[in-house]
Amino acid sequence: MLVSRDVQRDNSVVRVGEAAFGDGSFPVIAGPCAVESEDQLMACARAIADSGGQLLRGGAFKPRTSPYDFQGLGEEGLKLLALARDRYGLAIVTEVMSENEIPLVAAYADLMQVGARNMQNYGLLRALGKAGKPVLLKRGLSATLKEWLSAAEYILANGNPDVILCERGIRSFDSHTRNVLDIAAVPAMQEMTHLPVIVDPSHATGRRSLIAPLARAAVAVGADGLLVECHPDPDNAWSDGAQSLNLNQFREMMLQLPCRILKA
Amino acid sequence: MLVSRDVQRDNSVVRVGEAAFGDGSFPVIAGPCAVESEDQLMACARAIADSGGQLLRGGAFKPRTSPYDFQGLGEEGLKLLALARDRYGLAIVTEVMSENEIPLVAAYADLMQVGARNMQNYGLLRALGKAGKPVLLKRGLSATLKEWLSAAEYILANGNPDVILCERGIRSFDSHTRNVLDIAAVPAMQEMTHLPVIVDPSHATGRRSLIAPLARAAVAVGADGLLVECHPDPDNAWSDGAQSLNLNQFREMMLQLPCRILKA
Amino acid sequence: MLVSRDVQRDNSVVRVGEAAFGDGSFPVIAGPCAVESEDQLMACARAIADSGGQLLRGGAFKPRTSPYDFQGLGEEGLKLLALARDRYGLAIVTEVMSENEIPLVAAYADLMQVGARNMQNYGLLRALGKAGKPVLLKRGLSATLKEWLSAAEYILANGNPDVILCERGIRSFDSHTRNVLDIAAVPAMQEMTHLPVIVDPSHATGRRSLIAPLARAAVAVGADGLLVECHPDPDNAWSDGAQSLNLNQFREMMLQLPCRILKA
Amino acid sequence: MLVSRDVQRDNSVVRVGEAAFGDGSFPVIAGPCAVESEDQLMACARAIADSGGQLLRGGAFKPRTSPYDFQGLGEEGLKLLALARDRYGLAIVTEVMSENEIPLVAAYADLMQVGARNMQNYGLLRALGKAGKPVLLKRGLSATLKEWLSAAEYILANGNPDVILCERGIRSFDSHTRNVLDIAAVPAMQEMTHLPVIVDPSHATGRRSLIAPLARAAVAVGADGLLVECHPDPDNAWSDGAQSLNLNQFREMMLQLPCRILKA
């Protein structure tokens, strides 16, 4: 398989804007679950840029369990993300849910996210192999490491070597946390593949108070970056408020990441 | 939600060819994992028709974990399915993996299958809401009952009331069987929704010897039908051979289903 | 292993009172979660005997998650069970939680139950190997089939061939039901071992409405018996009320078990 | 509940020999899965003492899945542990599997371990509440955080406040690692209880190469200590060799733990 360390011994370095994933640095992606408004997004972007984060995430097309939940602002959301990039110099990460939306999303995004529910949407993966943009591939809710690697292989086999893997928690029997962060998946995947592996403690736990400790653990375990949700007013977020840091909490978390301090 | 028993107390009856799902009968869908050749498919179709099965399944577009595994015969496979329908009077069930393939698949299939990996591919679900064909919605590998219902709601909310739900096993910690058949999901879902619920013991267990006992259990628990894999030569099947009945085993299983005998 | 079909091809038949597990019949064990009072227990026993059930279960020593929950009536409960046996001719099944309680429990019980939490309490298993009474070994909450077989082996290897296995649901990610009944474990275990395998749909689902359909499925799949909870007034049960049938529901369920009707 | 932060806001500090769990330090428990011989144990003890570890673990009574596997050296193993304590000044941790073995084990051990399989062996927990020695309570294979807390409560409610909790991985669907280390359980438990929480990456992963990264993550997440398996010759260990560090790997791991370096 193209993703295998047997094929390429050295780490792949995936560059997105000024960030590099896989070179020993620890880029931080942050932002709200969904783009809600210009004010909300710009407040996040400013805090991220000020704290040393390098990428802004925000959903414009949202995969929601219920068809009656807020489905995202669509292209309006993408335009706000592009505006934030222009103002704050952050690269843009946003989810693409369908092959047919790839051209639209690729026109705005620097890094195209495949959500956990779509990890084995093979039509989408094949099309992203040809889309000319780096891809952030989240682990499926109950995907084995081998299935996750094979999903990445669909993208590489179709011509795109720039894939970042994101561990975001797996399903378990305990509802205390939303999912269980499989932190051992980071070094286990790094043994098998040369692709960078980052950690998302927000979706993994669904609990604000656990994000900072898990972000520190992600650094310690050797992850290639971090993805966290933040929001200027989590209690009134349209989605995922319980797992979003407010902007002060986000700044405090950033100060706890040793490699970030060193680079600042 | 439109799928709820609170909205509609009586069972929905979904008609596909001459079969009716949800009227108290127990239609049987059978066939190979993948369409491989005319000989293979016609041998299955003949055995199914002779044994009282009403629908023929077979994959033409296959969702495979690895991009290097056989991906299906594509339209050639669909044509063979249509030929089998003409010869043996069986309705055709086949998987559709992508919104863009819906027109092609709908031109041949009587029942459009959404696989477990695509249960939350919302673009696909929305498009199937408008495709004018009944849909067989498999439960995701680790989908809760509520997530599964919500996935069906995407189809109904987009205009298509003809959805059949299929329990096909969930992920667990024991690799003795491929998955764990959640047989209680059948009555549990029937309490919550008016949609028919069928059982697939082949994917649930991955073991040929367990299929007949589980098929009998599906009848006993009150399922609205059955989906099983069969193949004229399972040991040489291109995929899923270990969980396919050979045609004699299929006939024997059919004889063990009490309601089938009564109707014959 | 002594439990293996390779060692003994024919089914083991475990006799408890007048019931036989493993001879093709389908004995029914029923009763309350915990023995609460003489009135409660005798009402259950009468309904069970009248409906064709053969064994009365009831906890006198209860394994409770919290140390502050009701822990059982102890020997007082055992005496009430013995009284019910005398009055209604039912064999007695009750849980033993500790090696040190074996002599006391064995003085009253006909079948000694090992609960799911103690499936790998090896001291207890070894001691039950020498206790001279049949053992009902429940599957652990997340025990693989091989671990379950090995737990039974501890009992056989210490001299006791009379072990009945009980599938009672395994842990999963969906809280809709308390556990997931792994119905395929019944034929899968029967392939590997000559020991009888019964089904407990009460603990498996935690939902009263699902018990009768699953009991029918247990017959259909080929189980060697059934264990269900019933109570004269489930809404006021001291434990497990939500998963207990009332006595009318119990009688109705018994009428739905085809083999029971045939034998009556 | 006595274990709750609502009852006691400040951390409990559990002292074992010269180590303190819960005071902000990070004591390391290490040693072989099972005590095999004097040479093996003394080699481990020397390496642990030299590297700054404070406690020696080793099984004398082993809970083995099969009754035919090595069950431990029994009291002979306990004597070797006591000898190592005398020679190297390390406190001794060993498992107790049965109430009846408590007096024997307590005569040698400084910290009494309850294994994952016995987490809900309530007779054992109650007896350890009265045994006058600190207890190391491992999380059950599929125990929820609340069940784990309730198990600890059994010990405190019976008079023993000195309980250390140990996260050691939970069951999941992926066999790539033996279990999944639920690293978020550490801060999640610390929010709910004042008891110290340590991490065991050896049993969590079953893979030697993942232990050092996870040990670093345990420090970073705020765990109160570490338990790892080491062996002078893992490839010839009588049990758990695949997850044991050799003594050089153990020393290297110790050098990667920042708090250890500071204290050295």
Image (spheres, coloured by chain):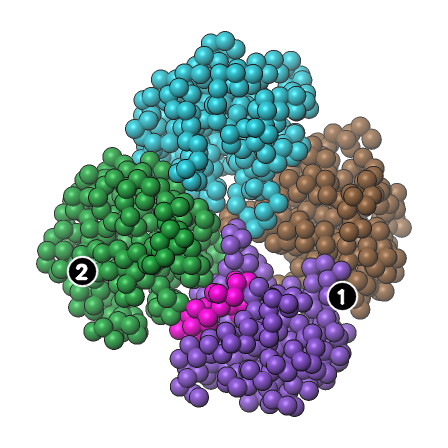
Chain colours: A brown, B purple, C green, D cyan
Q: Nearer the viewer, mark 2 or mark 1?
A: 2
Chain hosting mark 1: A
Image quarter for residue A29?
A: top right
Q: Is residue B15 above or below residue D47?
A: below
- Asked whether the viewer can see residue C226, the reply is no
Query: A124 or B81: which is nearer to us?
Result: B81
Label 1: few (<14), some (14–19) or many (≥20) C-alpha neighbours in 10 Å: some
Q: Sort mark 2 into few (<14), some (14-19) or many (20+) by Cα contacts within 10 Å.
A: few
- In the image, farthest residue toward the left: C87
Main secondary structure type of the part rendered in magenta: helix
Q: Which of the pair A48/A213 is nearer the observer?
A: A213
- Kindly identify which residue carries mark 2: C18
Instruction: Find the magenta span and give its range.
Output: B200-224
Q: Amino acid at mark 1?
A: Gly
Q: Residue at x 52, y 45 (%)?
A: D171
User: Could you tell me if the residues under marks 2 and 1 are in contact, i.e. CB atoms within 8 Å?
Assistant: no
Residue A115 among magenta residues: no
| B186 left or right, relative to A69 | left
At x 30%, y 74%, the residue is C258
Evaluate whether residue B43 shows in this view. yes
